[in-house]
Amino acid sequence: MLATLSEGAFDDKDWIFEIKYDGYRALAACDGQGNTELYSRNLLSFNKDFPDAVQNLETMSHQCLLDGEVVVEDDKGVSRFQLLQNYQNTKAGELKYYVFDILNLDGNDLTALPLIERKQLLQLLLKKEKLHNVIYSDHIEEKGISFFASAEKNGLEGIIAKDAHSPYRIDKRSSEWKKIKISKEQEAIIVGITQPKGQRNHFGALLLAVYDGAELQYIGNCGTGFDQKTLAELYKKFQPLFIDKSPFKQKIPLSATVQWIKPQLVCQVKFTEWTKDGSMRHPVFLGLRKDKKAKEVKREIPFDMEKKTKGTKAVADGTSKESDYEMKVGKTILKLTNQNKLYWPDDKITKGDLVNYYASVADVILPYLKDRPQSLHRFPNGILDAGFYQKDMDTDKVPEWLHTEKVFSESNNEHLDYLICNDKETLLYMANLGCIEIHPWNSRIQTPENPDWVVIDLDPEDIAFTEVVKAALETRKLLDSLEIESYCKTSGSTGLHIYIPLAARYDYEIAKTFAQSIATQINEILPKTTSILRMPAKRKKKVYLDFLQNRRAQTLAAPYSVRPKPGATVSTPLEWSEVNSKLDVSKFTIKNTLKRLDSKGDLWEPVIGKVVNLDKAIRKIYEQGSE
């Protein structure tokens, strides 16, 4: 589990605070029979590097999987990364393994337990085992601001804030863990060296980069932090990686002669601040990081904001004690406003919570929004006030970086400037406008007359939800008989949505005709509990089998969209095995969607990736009707 870089310490009774160690993150797998594997995040073995720690862990009498940090402390008890780098050669300082979490104990998976309970078990275990230099990483509760001040006074690197009730999210970077640094440090990829000058040997400075998406981004040169021995050792490592061409796609303005290096080696650098052009000011080399992969290295800018406004300190997960602040997303600075406004007053859920949710699920939801006109459903005053729809964007007033497309609206009988949401910054811009729910078209701007899916909306009218489930299962049974794969999600309100992937192969008329045929057959199977009549007065106490959603410009809540309903429910993809009499759609909310995604992944992915053969299915329906 990884922490999100954040700005500003805070007090919170539901959070605990630990020291941020300056070492190597390490997992220890102990079998309780004298065997231990100590390894890094990217599964590199540390057994030969830190045999003292391994020997201690091998005396463990229980099978367990521990998470912690290997450090070397100076004579004041402060961990120093440079001491750790040189430990194998100098043995200077004291090697320790601080353990702050436990994932498994005697074959029992503990990751779903709240953090505070995991730490209690860990503390009892290490107290019983009494291992030398394997130490329980203690914490304080609630008082993060004073703890940060104490860490600063004692020359520590920073603190880690953790939600005391959070599960352990394997291989995920979560805002439930936050790193709050005192000094600025950055992992960087070494991509080149300059020629040495004066009495220096081997090289002058390192050229450093990070990844921005799939491309390398230059972040400056580092020419300090080396002695002659370090220069020689590094140059020896660089030589096998020398390349002739720059690894950057864009030209880097450099006056010095450069020897380019294959972007594989990662180093740790401390610096004073980021410059306006995105470089580090006064960088100092601390050492190589063999526990990090180059592809993982990105610019570390606090998630909360790149530039704070004046006022109280920010809470460090994208939420803020400030109501207004700025956040950098990609190359865009978003101005987020009224983040403390309660959108769900009864549930104490704010606009900021909504923005943070969409920031967390952006990578998952964006494929279902890409290139689709958006019908903005805005609730600027929260769910208790009536919201309103907005299709047309005022292109003279919105930011220039927003992507809009002129699309003809049949209901308005004119071309409108629809917003297209293809990136995270646009998604958060929409959330900041009060778009609680996200409503994309079923087709893309490239193929506006051809939907990417057929949808059947099961909408109950004053009837038990178990009847919705029955209708959904009968629909799946019918589709299975036609050899058509289907996918179900909660509407986020009271119903269910069944989708059939088309990949824009058919037009809306065919999609609607097919959906109508399916709905009609289900209505014939369940005439007492379902209806295909559009007027609500004529379908009371029945499940409306809505096939009319299969029309140009119609929209439904996207998968993973929040809904303006009590509890902040989310339209959630389901496994068909979950569609049963025990299904409760109100249980899928903004508070547990991330955990569900961690455990199940994106169940909706085949809806975009597959295509069904409607021609074959329609022929089969016709043949069955003829019989």
Image: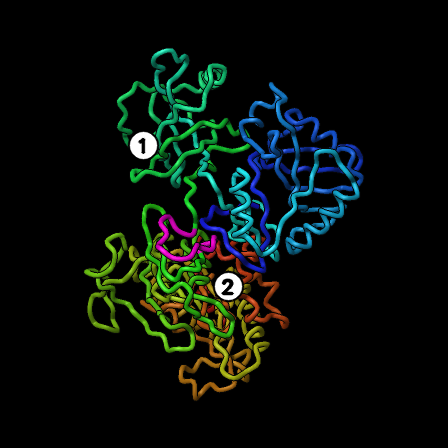
Figure quadrant of residue 382: bottom left
Q: Residue at x 30, y 40 (%)?
A: 276
Figure quadrant of residue 503: bottom left
Q: Which residues are magenta?
A: 304-318
Give the camera-side residue of 479 and 539: 539
Q: Main secondary structure of the magenta part?
A: loop
Magenta stretch: residue 150 in it? no
Give the camera-side residue of 405 and 176: 176
**Crowding near pointer 2: few (<14 within 10 Å), some, many (20+)?**
many
On the picture, is 394 further left or further right than 605? left
Q: Which mark is residue 590?
A: 2
Give the camera-side residue of 51 and 503: 51
Q: Position of residue 88 (x, y in %)?
A: 61, 21
Q: Position of residue 361 (x, y in %)?
A: 46, 55
**Crowding near pointer 1: few (<14 within 10 Å), some, many (20+)?**
few
Circle 1 sits in a helix, a strand or a loop, which is it? loop
On the picture, is 254 further left or further right than 502? left
Whichever of labels 2 and 1 marks the residue nearer the N terminus, that label is 1
What amino acid does circle 2 point to?
Ile
Q: Which mark is residue 601?
A: none
What amino acid does circle 1 point to?
Lys
Circle 2 sits in a helix, a strand or a loop, which is it? loop
Q: Is residue 101 above or below residue 611?
A: above
Q: Is residue 129 above or below residue 316?
A: above
Q: Is residue 403 above or below residue 3?
A: below
The answer to whether one can see residue 564 in this image is yes
Q: Which residue matches tag 1?
A: 249
For marks 2 and 1, give the CA distance.
39 Å
The answer to whether one can see residue 361 in this image is no
Q: Is residue 299 above or below residue 335?
A: above
